[in-house]
Amino acid sequence: MLHFSRWKITLILGAIMVGLLFAMPNALSEKTREGLPWPLPKQTLNLGLDLQGGAHLLLEVDLKDGVEKTLKSELAGMRAALREDRISAILRIKDEAIFVTFKNDADAKTGAPIMRKQSVPVDANAIGGGGKTLVINKLDELRYKVSVSQAYIDYLSNRTIEQSIQVLRKRIDPTGTTEMTLAKEGSERILLQVPGAKDVDELKARIAKTAKLGFHQVSPADQVVMELCIENNQCPLGKVAYPQKDGTGYMMVQDREIVTGADLKSASEGLHPQNNYPIVNFKYNARGARKFCDFTATHVGEPFAVVLDGEIITAPNINGAICGGQGFIEGSFTMESAKELSLLLNAGALPAKLNIAEERTVGPELGADSINAGKIASILGLVGVAIFMWLSYGLRFGTFANIALTTNIILIAGALSLLGATLTLPGIAGIILTIGMAVDANVLIFERIREETQNGRGPINAIDTGYRLSLAPILDANITTLIAALTLYFVGSGPIRGFAVTLSIGIVMSVFTAVVVARLMTSTWLRRARPKKLPI
């Protein structure tokens, strides 16, 4: 139990050195860290919102906007289905409902079943479908009212929040290094906390953008038709007028997109292959590539419009079939705006608008006070535990325990830095708690060694028995605590998870330092000093 081979000693010392290397950047200034050579790590602990300040936003999903989008989609589907069977009807949206007026009784009799088919199960994966998407009420022989069902509104709310969280995560933290908090709050709200955010207005602007991309067929129109469409919203059926980004006026296009941002596979900023100005490269998935290829092959020589958020960025002519599934968008970009657009396109469009229900900017002053208080508490705790161990187990064994405790703290800092974990106030509490818990294993071992010594065993036998028989209760105690910490991590969120992370890492490191590191120091001293009596 006390014998250590050379390769074991090498592994133990190597693990300690690695932990020291990863913990070291936390004690260096930013300038010094940047000057470190390549092999040395530069990553430090991330400080949470409560320590370094940042933005705290509570976002509320605009369900009315989601319902409006649903009604527009259903209106287009119903209109297409009725038109396919040559049924005459007037469809319009009013008061959060679709009102359908058939031309005559024959059209109403034939069109009503077609219209009812548009109401489908809310969730095909749910037992019973979770209800229907639409509620269709007959007003009289020729008129019907179609509204969105409450079951679909509830489903839309849950799905919108889930999708919005995914989109916001990609928009705000595309690299995954910000360590922001993004979670559902209640049934219609999203909590967003971004540590270190300095420009809250930029953050809100990024949230507000929709990045809805579409390729539309250009539809020429004379001046009178264009003016009626722009000024009185009296556009020809299936057509719409969008302003051009360069300010040259409006252009009429087909309302239905050739391909949309939903078919986009990826987007990235780049430079024009010939003229060397900023562009946005795009690549479509297989479905989008096929649709774009079919359209461009049959409309050679005609223009098509690239529409982003209701504005025509560019409207180039089709010189030939574009069947590679990729191309680029040009439109007076800077490299920064091209990068921003590609980021938004990759993230996708929000399924509904998000309104800011609460906004707070947390300054770093409170965080600085908290960090200082945490440092003082950690130092006092460490000194108090060290004095207790010296008084209880003597200078020799107390020093072994205190060195193991110091190593434990270094390894915790190294592990948190390696993982890029975020340190919050609860995380600091977890570290301070670990300092007190870390010597539990040493107490069990030393008390057992003292008991074996009092029973007449020699130094080597007493130490070997103490470490060997204490291992089981040490593992039992720490495994049960680790189970509780892991439960906090998987069930909790935000600061609770930060506390669970530091506590879990502290438990693992404390067992390693007490059972392995302290035993290595004890066996090394025992082999060299060969004492007749243990000073414990």
Image: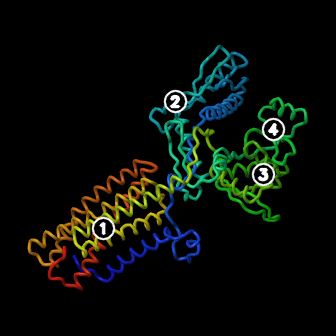
- The quarter of the displayed image where residue 278 is located: bottom right
Mark nearest the camera among 2 and 3 is 2
Amino acid type, mark 4:
Ala
Tag 2 residue? 151
Tag 4 residue? 241
Q: Tell me if I can see residue 1 in this picture.
A: yes
In this image, 252 relative to 127: left or right? right
Q: Residues within 10 Å of mark 1 (few under 14, many from 20)?
A: many
N-terminal label among 1 and 3: 3
Instruction: Return the residue nearer the eye: 343 or 266.
Output: 343
**C-alpha gap between disc 4 and disc 3:** 25 Å
Amino acid type, mark 3:
Ala
Q: Is residue 2 above or below residue 354?
A: below
Q: Residue at x 55, y 31 (%)?
A: 153
**C-alpha gap between disc 2 and disc 4:** 35 Å
Q: Residue at x 21, y 62 (%)?
A: 473
